[in-house]
Amino acid sequence: MEMHMNVHEICRICLREVPLIDILKLGAKTSMWMSDINSYFKVQLTFDDDKSTSLCKRCIGKIKTWRKQVERAERCQFIVDYLDTVYQKQIVGGEIKKENEEK
Ligand SMILES: [Zn+2]
């Protein structure tokens, strides 16, 4: 029995066959994609990989969405830090206690 599946024409992550994007052909962005694929899927692609270095659009999309969520979380930390600073000042100044007593 012969296997006709081309091991280089499947998504490295989910085995789908189309449409594929070869990560090694993304030029300057290839390293960043390799790093993000490893962070997100725990799969490490290499430049001399014998296995498929392609991902399907769905898996690529998951990483794009994840990147946006990470960026958003990062931006939100500024607000979290600010709120924490305000809160800490109120505790030190006894303002929270005072407000509660007045009500
Ligand atoms: Zn996939």
Image: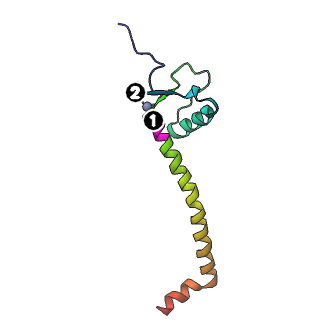
Kindly tell me whether mark 1's CB lies below 8 Å from ligand 1: yes
Give me the residue at 50% from left, 50% from top.
69
Relative height, residue 51 to residue 64 (above, below): above
- Quadrant of the displayed image that contains ligand 1: top left
Give me the residue at 61% from left, 37% from top.
32
The answer to which of 36 and 27 lies nearer the viewer is 27
Relative height, residue 88 to residue 6 (above, below): below
Disc 1 target residue = 59
Q: Is residue 59 left or right of residue 74?
A: left
Q: Is residue 32 left or right of residue 1?
A: right
Q: Which residues are magenta?
A: 59-63
Which label was assigned to residue 16?
2
Binning the other alpha carbons within 10 Å of mark 2 as few (below 14), some (14 to 19) or many (20 upward) gives some
Q: Identify the main secondary structure in magenta.
A: helix
Q: Tell me if residue 73 is in the magenta stretch.
A: no
In three-dimensional space, the C-alpha distance between marks 2 and 1, rounded to whole angstroms, equals 10 Å
- Rendered location of residue 23, percent (x, y): 55, 29
- Rendered location of residue 59, percent (x, y): 45, 35
Give me the residue at 61% from left, 21% from top.
48
Kindly tell me whether mark 2's CB lies below 8 Å from ligand 1: yes
The answer to which of 45 and 25 lies nearer the viewer is 25
- Rendered location of residue 11, percent (x, y): 45, 27
Relative height, residue 47 to residue 73 (above, below): above
